[in-house]
Every structure is written in C-alpha cells, then in structure tokens.
Image (spheres, rainbow, N blue to C red):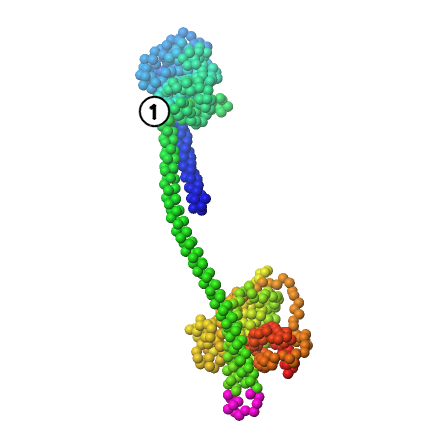
Amino acid sequence: MNVRLKIFLLLSLVLLSAMTTYVWFYSLMDHQRLLDEFKTAASEAEDAFRGEQQATEINMLQIATFIAQDQKVQQLFLLGKKAVALSGGSTGDELANQVRQSLLEYVQGSQQILADKFGFRQLHFHFEPGSLSFLRVYHNERYGDRMDNIRFTVVAANAEQKDITGFETGRIVSGIRGVAPMYATDSISHERIHLGALEAETSFATTLSRFHSARPSQEVAVLLTKEHLETNLWPEFLDKLLKQRPFIKGYRVEGTTSPAIEKYLTHKSFSETILSSGQHLLQDGESSYNVISFPLRDFHGEQDSTVADAGLVVVWQEVSDKIAAFHDHVAFLIFYGALLFIVIEVLMYYALKLVTTQLQQELLKTQKKEVKTQQARLVAEESSRSKTEFLNNMSHEIRTPMNTIMGLGRLLSETSLNQQQQNYIDKINLSSKDLLSLIDDILLIANMESQSVAALAVEEFNPEKLLRRVVDNFSRKAKNNDVALHVNLSSQLPHSLEGSPKQIEWALNQLIENALKFNSGHDVVLSLQLLEQNNNTATLEFAVTDKGIGIADTQKEKIFQPFYQGDGSKTRAYGGTGLGLTIVQKICQQLGGELTLESTLGHGSRFSFCLTFQKSVTTTIDHPVTSENLPQEEISSALPLGDISELVTIIHQLEEPLHQLQAISCQKIALSLADRQWPAPLNRQVQMLRNLIQEYRFIEAQTALQRLKQQLV
C-alpha cells in the first residue's frame, strides 16, 4: 500500500467520522427540539384546561350571584328558613314544603333561559351554618340532608360569607361549582339576614367542549377515581353512573372529547403510561401521540394537601406528521451527507493525486539539488583541503629560504659595514620579517578555516588568571610605548570554567597589540565582566578599550575583512598585514561568540565579544612543563648543518619578542617550530619550547630558549 493510498484512506476515515458526527449531532438536536416542542405543547395544554375550568367556575358563580340577588328568591328562601326552624327538623313541615314548591316553580319558570344559555344543570339552596340542603332544583325530591363533610364549597361560603368556586363531587353528581352567599331583609325587623348559599353547578362537558373548540387538534378526558366517587356519591346515583360508564383501571371517565380514551385505558402499556402524571409519547400502530396527564384536585384537596387526588386529566394530540417530518429530515441529512461525502471523496482523491504528484516532482528536484549541493560541498572541501595543503607547502617552502635570508642578514649586520650598507641590510631584515609575518598570518587563517568547533580543546581555566597573564605579557611593551594598561574585572567572576583559554588569550593579545599600536600616549583598558550566570553556565564579556585614532563609520564593516587596514596613510604609519582582526573574529565565531566594534573617529575604539561557558564541577591540578624539567640531552654533532642553521635562525627571531614579551610575534614564530619535523633529539626539545610559547609562558620559554641555544652553539 503506497503512501498516497494510506493518506487517502486516513483522510476518508476522518471525513467519514466528521460527516457521521455532523449527521448524528444535528439529528440529535432536531430530536431534542421536537421533544421540547412536545413538552411545551403539553404544558400549554395543561394551562389551557385549567384556564377553561376557571372560566366555567366564574360563569357558575355569576349565575348563582344573579339568582341570589332576586328579591323574590330571597324572600321565599327566608320564608322557607323560618318554616324549617319552626318545625324543628331539617326537612320542615307542610309550610316548609309549600314554600319549597313555590321557590321551585319560580326558579324553573324564570331561570330556564339562563340554564339553556350557560349550560348549568343544577341550582342548590343551602341553609347555614354548614350545608343543609333546602332545595335541589333538578332533583327536588331530595332535600333536608346535611352535607358538612361533603360540600366544602358551601361550608366555606357560609362560614366566610364570600363567593367560592371549585370542582366538587356531591351526593348526586360531580361538577364545577360557583357558590354565592344569600341574604334577605326581614319585613318585620327590617334586618339584613344571612340565610345560606346558592350553588350553581355544571358538568365538565362545557369545559371540555370549549377546550376542544379552541384547540381542535387536541383531545381531552377527565377521569375520576373510584375512591373519590364512592366516598361522596349516594350509592344509587353511583350505580346509575356506572351503568353508563364503568370503572376502568380504577377510574371512571367523567367526560371526554374522544371515546378513544376508553380504548387506551384498556391497553395495558398505554394505561400504565397514561395514568402516570407527566408528558409521554405513545405509539398506536402507525399513529403517534403526545400525551400529558396531570392530577385533578377538588376544592377540599386544594385546601388540604393530605387529601388524595380526585382524578386525572388526560390531554393527547396526534403528532404522527411531526415525527414523520423529523424522520424525513434525518433521512435528508443522511442522503445529502452521503452525497457530500462522495463528492468530497472524489475531489479529495484527485486533489491528493495532484498534490502528491507535485510533491514527488519537488522531492525529485530537491534530491537532485541535494546531490548537486553534496557534490559542490565535496568539491569545496577538496578545494579547501588543497588550498590548505598548498598554503602549508608554500609556507614551508617560502619560510625555509626566508629564514636563510634573515639568518644571513643578521650575520651581515654583525660584520663591519659602512652606513649605506647597514641601511640596506636593515631594510632587508625588516622586509624579510614583515614578509614572514604575512606568511604566518595567512597560514593561521587557512588552518582556522579548516578547523571545526568540535576540534577546539576544552579545558578548565580561571578567567581572572587568564586576564592577568595577558596583561603581564604586554606590561613591558605598554611601558615602552608610554601607555597605561588597566584591568577592569567583575567582582563576581567564577573561579573555574570550561572552555578554550588559549584561543581566548590569543584573541585578547591581538586586540591589545592593536590597541598599543594605534594608541600611543593614552590608556588601554582590558575589561572582563560577568553578564549572567546560573548553576551550570556563565556568560562573560571580554573587552579592550583604547583612546587612539578610532575608526570611521564607513570603515567599521570593512575593518574585519582580510588585508583591510583603513586608508593608506595609516597603513604606512602603523604597518601590519591587516589580518589580525580577521583572525580574532574567526576565533570568536569558533567559540560561539561575535566580535563587535564601537568606535568614534578620533576618540578611540572598543572591541568586545561575549562567550558562554560551562561551569567546572571538578578542580584539576595543573603540572606545567617548566624550563627546569626540560630533558638535558646532548645534541648530536652529527646533525645536518642545514637543520642547525635553520633552527639557529628561528632562535634569533625569538630572542627579541620573548625579551619584549610580544605575544603575537612569539605565536607566529612558534608556527615555524611546528612547521616541520625536526631530527631527534632536537624534535623533543623544540616541541617543548613550542608548547611553552603557545601557553604564553614566555619567562620559562626564555630560559628554555637560552639553554637550547647554548647546546646548539
């Protein structure tokens, strides 16, 4: 399986997961939105039913109040109350019956229009206190019964003498009732007397009809519990009701807008769901219904929370079309999601094919470039190696005759010469010395270009001692040039660091030698400051500051170029090859730093570089090589005369810089010692002398040089 196919399959899997997640997420959101819609509809249905019930209660109260304010009704009710009181019983005597009949005839005759218009089915007159039945208009054969423990609406209206409404089940029927207190003015005493209460009652049919008219898509049913009906109704009236609609699952359907409720109640799973309060979804074949069931409380139950519910109100609505629309929407999402997946797959396949083809072409180009770069690098390395070998060979080939010339020039200068001849030989010696210095600088640069950072020796050193040693090397030359050489050390320098002290010392020597050369009569400051440190590393700044001739802004970038020395007048005045700063910069770069310059023409210069060192975790004891432990070997008199002559010439060249502690010149001459392999036993002593010079231990090098010279002589 190639890479492109793997990438395509991986992207396809990611895309498929994303599309599936998208369809699932939005389907879930739509499903939740649909459920929320059903819950909202159920909650609104409950509020609507209770609103219609309350409106019916108000209508019943208005009817009861209207009739109770009829003066003839009041006088007849007052007369009946007196008749019952005179008889001493609850039903009254013949006079009470006559008054009851007169009240019945008056109410039936004049109030039938109200009954037809507002749908009430019962008017019931009750004496106070409590509830003593005087007249049931539509069941006038029943009267004289006390209902204090049943008709709580009437008891409350008589006790508080205020209007009362609510659902309640009486002796004969269950209904929605409005109860108004009744008063009458006694014609004899002219006092306004509280007689009792008039109750107007209607069934749930009016409420259900009005509910269904306002919300035709919803059906509603009122269910009353068996316990509630058996507690309140007279047995004969309960039996009559049960013949019409028997109990189902412990409930009797009091009223409904759809006969389907009886079918649902007989269904086991449906009945269990319907008879539990809350919102539910029911499935009847291919039809789905949103159902809400909530408890029905009578007036007594509303006053006393310990009383059991009187029944249950069930509202249901067919939502098959909405569920079907939801399923269609889910199918739509799946279909178009699959279609989109296929389209994206096709586009992605060809896009991936195009991209991979381009990448392969670019990769091929890159590989070709890398091959060319590698070949160019090998050629460059070979060229650099050839250049280095050439420079080494040329340096050796040039240095050998130059040493001879310088040696002969030195010998000639010691003979008896006239003034003109002495001038000629001095110029020969000076030019030879400058030429040899130039050759040494070129060789040093070539060696540095071929050397990597990893090749630098890392050793422990004390930065303060390193700086002191540099100052000691130039103290005599500074004094001869009438220059004060100052040292500025940070007070918190670490005592031991790991780095390349020889390269650092060489760079500082070159900078100080330049400062002394271009700074006659002024101070030179060698500074070492601690910039930052932690437990493992320390960053130091090395700086050499002078107050000499300075460097123009136009020359600051050029000054680090090989052989660049500013204008010709300065070159002639101060001499030099123009390679010193180039070498210092390369040393700083090899050590991980950068040589920086701050200078103003005519006001001096400041050269600095920052290096970061590892702190030393161990302290080593250095056993330096000294002139005292140099081997005291006898040099064979059988050595070739050319070797002895060349070595004598180099020794003569070293005497003056060692005497004056000129570090740069000594280092350059030390290259002459390392340039060739001397015959034994010269080789060992020469190498030890070279090591002392490279470690800037010039005092010991002077002693070793004199001893070697004596042995050669």
- The N terminus: image quadrant: top left
- Can you identify the residue that label 1 sits on? 216
| Secondary structure mostly seen in the magenta stretch | helix
Relative to 500, residue 239 above or below: above
Q: Residue at the far bottom: name it.
A: 418
Left or right? Give the position of 702 relative to 523.
Answer: right
Left or right? Give the position of 649 relative to 169.
Answer: right
Question: Where residue 159 sits: x, y (%)?
Answer: 45, 21
- Pick the residue in front: 119 or 382: 382
Asked if the magenta segment contains residue 423, the reply would be yes
Q: Is residue 698 visible?
A: yes
Residue at 32% across / 13% down in the picture? 109
- Pick the residue in front: 59 or 690: 690
Relative to 56, residue 450 above or below: below
Residue at 42% across / 8% down in the picture? 93
Element under label 1?
Answer: loop
Left or right? Give the position of 313 relative to 512.
Answer: left
For the residue marked with disc 1, what is the amino acid?
Answer: Pro
Span shown in magenta: 412-424
- Pick the residue in front: 285 or 154: 285
Residue at 60% across / 75% down in the picture? 678
Question: Where residue 336 sits: x, y (%)?
Answer: 36, 37
Relative to 613, residue 245 above or below: above
